[in-house]
Amino acid sequence: MKGFILTTLAAVLLVGCSGELTGAVYYSTKGGDVKRLGDHEIVLVAATEAFEKEWREAREAYVVAMEPKMAAAEQARKEAAASSGYQEHLFDKAREAAGEADKVRSEHLAHALKLVAWGKTASARTDVNGKYSVNVPRGRYYVYGRHNGAINDMTWFVTVAVGGTTTLDLTGSNASGWPF
């Protein structure tokens, strides 16, 4: 009897400490139709102090690295646009500067994806109807998902507080928070 009571008490405590995050993932087509995104991974990252410190540092490093690259690309574009007649070397300079900015973005994107993998607490795959469900301890999480579509790419990095059953649909309107 004592074992049953302890087991029951432990189960009650565990249920009280866990939560469920449910939702669906939607995207819009070029024609404006709303579709559900099936067989897609949704990743939860616990909003721990360590993760948030690393994430903040990664965002700041990205901004510092991108500012001069973007300024150089913009300056080269302006020079090419202001030139009288076609001057291939100016357009080459603009393309090169834009390529440098793309290289910085790619490097920082790879680092950000490594941080998400490092901080991953749980994940779920959407079903054929775009729905997902994942059980996690109660707390604050970042929900990460990415859709590389033929028309548009969407990345979600949304903060959610999970307590009990919490619903978060990922749509075009909350596809944001991803700085890379």
Image (tube, grey):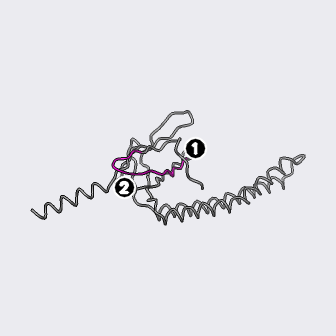
Report crowding for label 2: few under 14, some 14 to 19, many 20 or more residues within 10 A (C-alpha): many
Residue at 82 percent across and 49 percent down: it is 78
Q: Is mark 2 on a helix, strand or loop?
A: loop
Q: In the image, which residues are magenta?
A: 154-167
Q: Distance between the residues labelled 2 and 1?
A: 33 Å
Q: Earlier in the sequence, mark 2 or mark 1?
A: 2
Task: Give the quarter of the image for residue 102.
Answer: bottom right
Task: Give the quarter of the image for residue 96.
Answer: bottom right
The secondary structure that most of the magenta stretch takes on is strand
Residue at far right of view: 84
User: Type of residue at label 2?
Assistant: Arg
How many marks overall? 2
* Mark closer to the observer (2, 1): 2
Residue at 59 percent across and 54 percent down: it is 179
Residue designated by label 1: 152
Report the disc number at residue 136: none
User: Type of residue at label 1?
Assistant: Asn
Q: Does the magenta stretch include residue 35?
A: no
Above or below, comparing residue 15 to residue 26 in the picture: below
Residue at 80 percent across and 52 percent down: it is 91
Task: Give the quarter of the image for residue 141.
Answer: bottom left
Residue at 62 percent across and 60 percent down: it is 106
Could you tell me which quadrant the C terminus lies in?
Answer: bottom right
Residue designated by label 2: 138
Considering depth in this image, is 124 or 71 the residue closer to the camera?
71
Could you tell me which quadrant the N terminus lies in?
Answer: bottom left
Above or below, comparing residue 102 to residue 128 in the picture: below
**Lateral position of residue 66 relative to residue 113, left or right:** right
Residue 122, position as x, y percentages in the image: 39, 58
